[in-house]
Image (cartoon, rainbow, N blue to C red):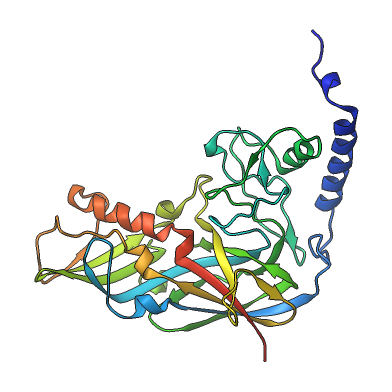
């Protein structure tokens, strides 16, 4: 049987060798490597708070007035990237996908390094083409599908905060500092973690207590989400493709030229936008929503969908004074 390899253009094979060599060089980077970037090291203080629309009672899309009484989340890490956020991908030639099933997922075979620390690889599904092959196909001008909303290419890893922390969103919180390099930050991701035993969260990594009122009927609900609830298509408890902006101008993306602060703003109005407790019997007691109870499953699914929205987590950067 004749091999199909000889049918590939000679230029493609030459490019392939060059890319594979680059990949081997990347995998051999030492602890002082900056992950392929020429940027300067920076210190990034980290903050978290509720979005302004979530601080006061608000009405969700289903007409329920919601007053949040408690909101906590347990995080493993925050990471920041050069790639555009979900739903804001630009049609740059580098942001392309070889034809593959829509479920192929994130394609990152060559994982970037930040300040010598490896970023956890995002394992692609068996159908996904490695990023190096995508680049080869693009170089050989083989047709590919342009990136579109819902696909996320993180691009170069630029910064991170790697301290496990439980955040009480009811009060602005100063988090442990992170590190990074100078560059244009355009998106970020959150990685959730099992909370410490003394946190009072049990196995919940997100908890919201909210009072929902409509037409004279009121419910107090406790909504919990576990690592399993937050697992993405690869089984990782990560929300990726969250937008990054400049705190000063509000413009998409932030030019980081020195030390500064990264602020995470969490929008509970998006978390709870589809919450509808109308099937529940009114009670003066707090109801803990249990996904194993049939009458609670719709509520839990609505909450789960809400907390997985990348747009509910907004990063911004402001330079140090």
Q: Tell me where residue 193 appears, x and y as whole percent.
A: 49, 62
- Horizontal side of 153 relative to 75 (left or right) equals right
- Is residue 315 among what the camera can see? yes
Viewer-side residue, 90 vs 238: 90
Q: Is residue 269 above or below residue 52?
A: above
Q: Tell me where residue 159 appears, x and y as whole percent.
A: 68, 69
Rendered residue at 71%/76% (across/down): 256
Q: Is residue 127 above or below residue 47?
A: above
Rendered residue at 38%/80% (across/down): 170
- Horizontal side of 150 relative to 144 (left or right) equals left
Viewer-side residue, 38 vs 245: 245
In the rendered view of the protein, which quadrant contains the N terminus?
top right
Q: Tell me where residue 118 appears, x and y as whole percent.
A: 71, 58
Rendered residue at 59%/64% (across/down): 188
Rendered residue at 71%/43% (across/down): 131
Q: Is residue 285 above or below residue 90?
A: below
Say how many tags the image has: 0
- Is residue 196 among what the camera can see? no
Q: Tell me where residue 135 appears, x and y as whole percent.
A: 76, 42
In the rendered view of the protein, which quadrant contains the C terminus?
bottom right
Q: Is residue 227 above or below residue 77?
A: above
Where residue 186 sits, quadrant-wise, is: bottom right
Where residue 7 sits, quadrant-wise, is: top right
Q: Residue furthest top?
A: 1
Where residue 69 sits, quadrant-wise, is: bottom left
- Horizontal side of 265 relative to 45 (left or right) equals left
Viewer-side residue, 236 vs 79: 79
- Horizontal side of 135 relative to 56 (left or right) equals right
Q: Residue furthest bottom?
A: 321
């Amino acid at each position: 049987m004749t091999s199909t390899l000889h049918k590939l253009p000679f230029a493609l094979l030459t490019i392939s060798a060059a890319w594979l060599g680059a990949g081997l060089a990347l995998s051999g980077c030492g602890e002082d490597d900056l992950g392929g970037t020429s940027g300067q090291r920076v210190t990034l203080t980290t903050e978290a708070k509720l979005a302004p629309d979530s601080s006061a009672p608000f009405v969700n899309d289903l007409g329920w007035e919601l007053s949040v009484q408690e909101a906590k989340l347990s995080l493993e890490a925050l990471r920041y990237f050069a790639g555009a956020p979900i739903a804001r991908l630009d049609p740059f030639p580098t942001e392309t996908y070889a034809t593959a099933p829509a479920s192929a997922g994130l394609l990152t075979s060559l994982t970037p390094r930040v300040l010598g620390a490896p970023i956890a690889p995002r394992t692609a599904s068996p159908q996904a083409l490695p990023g190096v092959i995508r680049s080869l196909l693009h170089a050989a001008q083989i047709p590919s599908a342009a990136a579109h909303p819902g696909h996320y290419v993180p691009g170069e890893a630029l910064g991170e905060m790697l301290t496990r922390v439980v955040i009480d969103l009811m009060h602005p919180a100063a988090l442990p500092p992170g590190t990074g390099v100078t560059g244009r930050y355009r998106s970020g991701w959150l990685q959730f973690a099992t909370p410490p035993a003394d946190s009072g969260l049990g196995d919940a990594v997100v908890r919201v207590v909210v009072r929902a009122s409509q037409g004279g009927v009121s419910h107090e609900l406790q909504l919990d989400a576990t690592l399993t609830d937050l697992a993405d298509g690869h089984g990782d408890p990560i929300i990726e493709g969250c937008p990054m902006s400049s705190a000063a101008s509000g413009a998409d993306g932030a030019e980081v030229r020195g030390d500064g602060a990264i602020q995470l703003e969490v929008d509970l109005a998006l978390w709870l936008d589809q919450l509808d407790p109308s099937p529940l019997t009114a009670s003066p007691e707090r109801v803990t929503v249990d996904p194993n109870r049939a009458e609670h499953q719709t509520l839990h699914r609505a909450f789960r969908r809400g907390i997985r929205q990348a747009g509910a987590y907004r990063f911004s950067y402001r330079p140090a004074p």
